[in-house]
Image: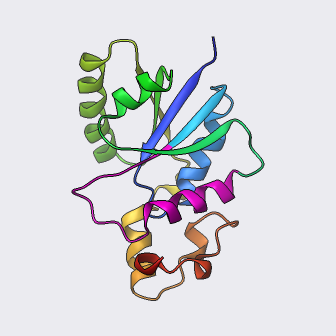
Amino acid sequence: MKKIAVFPGSFDPFTIGHEAIVRRALSLFDEIIIAVGANAIKKCYYPLKTRKKMISKVFQNEPRVKIDHYEGLTVDYCKKNGAKYILRGLRTAADFEFERAIAQVNKVMATGIETVFLLTVPEHTHINSTIVRDIICNGGDASQFVPASINLKDYKGKED
């Protein structure tokens, strides 16, 4: 049976930390679906289509990584796509507490789906999408925080 993991998130924008988690997880799973969540509560800078395009560019030469989007519960998306694993990256103790609570609720809702946590490498611990997005919104150079294949100058954010 194929081991499929879903890596859910808003990815606004996709960072080198996200990329590193996915690349490391490829040794654990046969396929990883990077599922860009449409969250009505969260205001995104980059439109969904743009975020998917950015991520696709990063993994264009990796056939085991699929890019998709979804609305609703992550466990429902996993069931629909035959995924038995939810992949999450952890940077801090605060991340752990937040992600642990979600994982435990998901486990109650879908007993056959496991959440797998990978610790972020130390050099990426300080990187998060909120900070990177703030740099971009304020005209700063965030290129060192996003994968090399993403040229932020090609993406205009809200106007895309």
Q: Nearer the viewer, residue 82 or 8?
A: 82
Q: Quadrant of residue 53?
A: bottom right
Give the answer, above or below, for where 54 lies relative to 23: below
Give the answer, above or below, for where 64 lies relative to 136: above
How far from the left and from the top, in percent, is residue 73?
30, 34
Q: Residue furthest right?
A: 61
Side of 41 where 95 appears, left or right: right
Q: Can residue 89 be seen in this view?
A: no
Protein image colouring? rainbow
Q: In which quarter of the image is the N terminus?
A: top right
How far from the left and from the top, in percent, is residue 86?
44, 30
Q: Is residue 46 magenta?
A: yes
Give the answer, above or below, for where 79 lies relative to 37: above
Give the answer, above or below, for where 114 lies relative to 134: above
Residue sitting at x 44%, y 71%: 132
Q: Which of 6 and 15 is in front in this view?
A: 6
The range drawn in magenta is 35-59
Residue sitting at x 74%, y 39%: 63
Residue sitting at x 44%, y 25%: 80
Residue sitting at x 42%, y 63%: 129
Q: Does the magenta stretch include residue 6?
A: no
How far from the left and from the top, in percent, is residue 139?
46, 89
Side of 98 where 120 appears, left or right: right
How far from the left and from the top, in percent, is residue 19?
60, 51
Q: How many marks?
A: 0
Q: Quadrant of residue 153?
A: bottom right
Q: Can residue 96 be seen in this view?
A: yes
